[in-house]
């Protein structure tokens, strides 16, 4: 028996359960229409909310970054990798987020791994985390010795029950801002009130709120006008901003502390000049105009209304994330393949990304979709739904 036989058995089990993820290959820039596995298809599953991934100005600034600063910093930030453009981007991001300060990391995932174990490292600490928080938050929690208390999804009452019971040297409440699979928004005002009442730090991962919620896409804290009441804002530029990287915004003392203690900052090379300059271009664009954010929301409303009209279950999303609920993973896989054959790229999502029995197609609406694109999608979703007995 091969020493790798357990891997083969696990893969076969995934295939039998309809949970094996066939990873498709992108052959062009991410746009409304994209080359996938050699075929031009309508792209409805990428996180390119504002179309920045192929935006002319971002591409221009990225090229300028490479020409002046090279392809990479070749060092960690704390030794020799902090370029002047990193500091410029952090200053601009802080101003955009209306916070005192920002520190940048290699990704949103790394930002959570940097913040959580650094702020509550001890077994004497306790953290309170929403049961549907993103995997990067879960992994950040695993990196600390702090006690982990899971509260019911978006349930301030249950959180308060736990806050009353659990004492700690430091207490940290953590939530996603927008939950990436269902598209619902965290009850941040209620969580902020509880954090203040129970002397706890409050952290929000706003990966799917950046570029989507708030004035010109400033995020969930701006959306609820909670500036100064949320201690740690984790964000990403790898979704709506169209590039790669993450950040933490908050007080100056917070970012100063993370610069001294956060392991992804100390032990992993800095973000590339191309990504940094493209991020600055995105911030500049959104600081001057909210036209793409408005178009994103117009497109979202149009598509959701069309899907509900023909009878699809699209859950309880409050954002452009549109889950098409199908139940069984095998059905979701078949639905996705049928759509792809017809010309739509919309991936099936099943366990462990979502709970068993909650498989779906997650449709990601973008500002670069035209009404013609959305009508095309509505027509083919309807055709496929009828063929497979979903509607």
Image (cartoon, grey):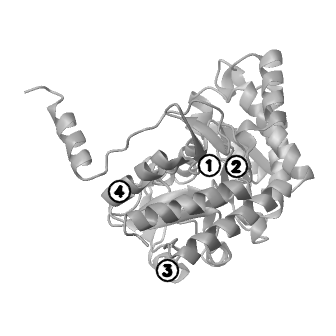
Tell me, yes or no, whether the two marked residues, 1 and 4, touch with CB atoms within 8 Å.
no
Q: Which residue was labeled with disc 2?
A: 240
Spot occupied by residue 249 in the image (x, y as percentages of width and height): 73, 51
Q: Secondary structure at mark 2?
A: loop
**Residue under label 4:** 351
The kind of secondary structure element at disc 4 is loop
Q: Secondary structure at mark 1?
A: loop
- Quadrant in the rendering for residue 365: bottom right
Q: Position of residue 56 (x, y in %)?
A: 82, 34
Q: Is residue 121 left or right of residue 208?
A: left
Determine contact: label 1, label 2, CB under 8 Å: yes
Label located before the other in sequence (2 or 3)? 3
**Where 140 sits versus 391, above or below?**
above
Upstream in the sequence, badge 1 or badge 4? Answer: 1
Q: CA distance from mark 1 to mark 2?
A: 6 Å
Q: CA distance from mark 1 to mark 3?
A: 38 Å
Q: CA distance from mark 2 to mark 4?
A: 25 Å
Q: Are marks 1 and 3 in contact (CB under 8 Å)?
A: no
Which is closer to the viewer, label 2 or label 3?
2
Name the residue nearer the viewer: 101 or 246. 246
> Of label 1 and label 3, which has the lower sequence position?
1
Task: Say the numbered circle drawn on residue 47.
Answer: 1
The residue that appears at 65% across and 17% down in the rendered structure is 74
Residue 181 vs 277, above or below: the answer is: below
Q: Tag 4 or tag 2, which sits nearer the N-term? A: 2
In this rendering, which labeled residue sits more in front, label 1 or label 3? 1
The residue positioned 62% from the left and 64% from the top of the image is 201
């Amino acid at each position: 028996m091969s020493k790798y036989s357990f891997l083969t058995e696990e893969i076969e089990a995934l295939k039998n359960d309809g949970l094996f993820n066939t990873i498709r290959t992108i052959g062009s820039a991410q746009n409304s229409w994209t080359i996938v596995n050699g075929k031009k298809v309508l792209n409805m599953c990428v996180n390119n909310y504002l179309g920045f991934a192929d935006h002319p100005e971002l591409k221009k600034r990225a090229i300028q970054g490479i020409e002046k600063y090279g392809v990479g910093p070749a060092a960690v930030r704390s030794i020799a990798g902090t370029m002047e453009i990193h500091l410029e981007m952090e200053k601009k991001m802080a101003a955009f987020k209306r916070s005192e300060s920002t520190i940048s990391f290699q990704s949103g995932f790394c930002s959570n791994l940097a913040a959580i174990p650094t702020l509550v490292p001890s077994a004497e600490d306790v953290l309170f985390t929403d049961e549907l928080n993103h995997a990067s938050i879960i992994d950040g929690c695993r990196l600390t010795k702090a006690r982990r208390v899971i509260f019911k999804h978006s349930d301030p009452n249950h959180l308060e029950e736990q806050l009353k019971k659990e004492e700690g040297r430091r207490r940290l409440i953590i939530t996603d801002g927008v939950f990436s699979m269902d598209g619902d928004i965290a009850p941040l005002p209620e969580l902020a009130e509880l954090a203040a009442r129970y002397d706890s730090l409050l952290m929000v991962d706003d990966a799917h709120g950046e570029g989507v919620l708030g004035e010109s896409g400033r995020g969930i804290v701006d959306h609820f006008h909670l500036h100064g009441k949320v201690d740690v804002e984790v964000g990403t530029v790898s979704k709506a901003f169209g590039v790669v990287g993450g950040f933490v915004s908050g007080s100056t003392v917070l970012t100063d502390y993370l610069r001294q203690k956060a392991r992804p900052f100390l032990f992993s090379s800095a973000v590339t000049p191309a990504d940094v300059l493209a991020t600055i271009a995105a911030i500049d664009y959104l600081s001057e105009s909210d036209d793409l954010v408005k178009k994103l929301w117009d497109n979202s409303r149009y598509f959701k209304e069309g899907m509900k009209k023909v009878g699809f279950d699209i859950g309880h999303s409050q954002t452009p994330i549109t889950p098409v609920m199908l139940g069984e993973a095998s059905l979701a896989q078949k639905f996705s393949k049928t759509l792809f054959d017809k010309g739509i790229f919309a991936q099936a999502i099943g366990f462990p990304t979502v709970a068993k029995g909650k498989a779906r197609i997650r449709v990601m609406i973008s500002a670069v979709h035209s009404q013609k694109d959305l009508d095309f999608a509505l027509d083919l979703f309807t055709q496929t739904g009828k063929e497979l007995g979903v509607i």
